[in-house]
Amino acid sequence: MATSKRAVGPEPIRFRGELSTIDDTTLVRFPEEASWQLPSRGQVAVRAVIDGHEFETVAEPDGRRGHWLRIEPQLQSAAGLGPGDSADMTVVVLQEWPEPDVPDDLGAALTEAPAEIRDMWEDLTPMARWEWVRWVRSTNNPETRQRRVTVSISKMQKGKRRPCCFDLSSCTDPDLARSGKLREPS
């Protein structure tokens, strides 16, 4: 994993966390005292180490003023961990955000957009790009999602650099959240 991004803030945040699942997603919730050491109730770019295995990601808000990290299957396998296991965690806040994975529908709309919108997208900070991606992905309704892609392009055409009108501290993963709050493990 690349370690070129600069860390910011106070000392690393250390805690022991339990891997749990919600449907097919494995995650680690931050204990309250660890979450409160983060600089925001919303998303925070972090470098994390789980039982000696380093990765960069974004700590996601849980909608209850806390945070959680998604633990991908490859990472679970490398660390020899699974749901129900506890792991030593170290989290360091990063100054520079990793690039988000742009969903295909938004990516296609950006590719088809006028040059000034593509230029604006490239000029946005990775953090702002995460917000657009998060807003588009925060629904399972195909019509709502397509409308959000269209509105994203329209807003950028009007000079808007960030989506508005959604709670950045809510859990916006539509597969894991109910009413903006991370569901309880299954």
Image (cartoon, rainbow, N blue to C red):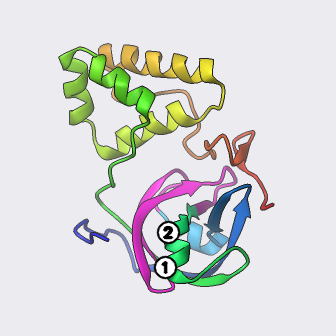
Q: Residues within 10 Å of mark 1 (few under 14, many from 20)?
A: few
Please name the residue that numbered disc 2 is placed on.
Answer: 74
Give the position of the C terminus as an image quadrant. Answer: bottom right
Of residues 175 and 38, the one nearer the viewer is: 175
Q: Which residue is found at the position 61% from the left and 42% from the top?
A: 172
- Amino acid type, callout 2: Gln
Q: Is residue 178 above or below residue 96?
A: above
Magenta span of residues: 39-68
Q: Are marks 2 and 1 in contact (CB under 8 Å)?
A: yes
Q: CA distance from mark 2 to mark 1?
A: 6 Å
**Is 142 part of what is drawn in magenta?**
no
Where is residue 174 drawn, in percent x and y? Answer: 66, 40
Give the position of the N terminus as an image quadrant. Answer: bottom left
**Is 57 part of what is drawn in magenta?**
yes
Where is residue 183 drawn, in percent x and y? Answer: 76, 52
Along the horizontal axis of the image, is 39 left or right of 138? left
- Amino acid type, callout 1: Ala
Where is residue 159 drawn, in percent x and y? Answer: 30, 19
Where is residue 151 drawn, in percent x and y? Answer: 46, 16
The dot on residue 78 is 1
Q: Which residue is found at the position 79% from the left and 58% from the top?
A: 184
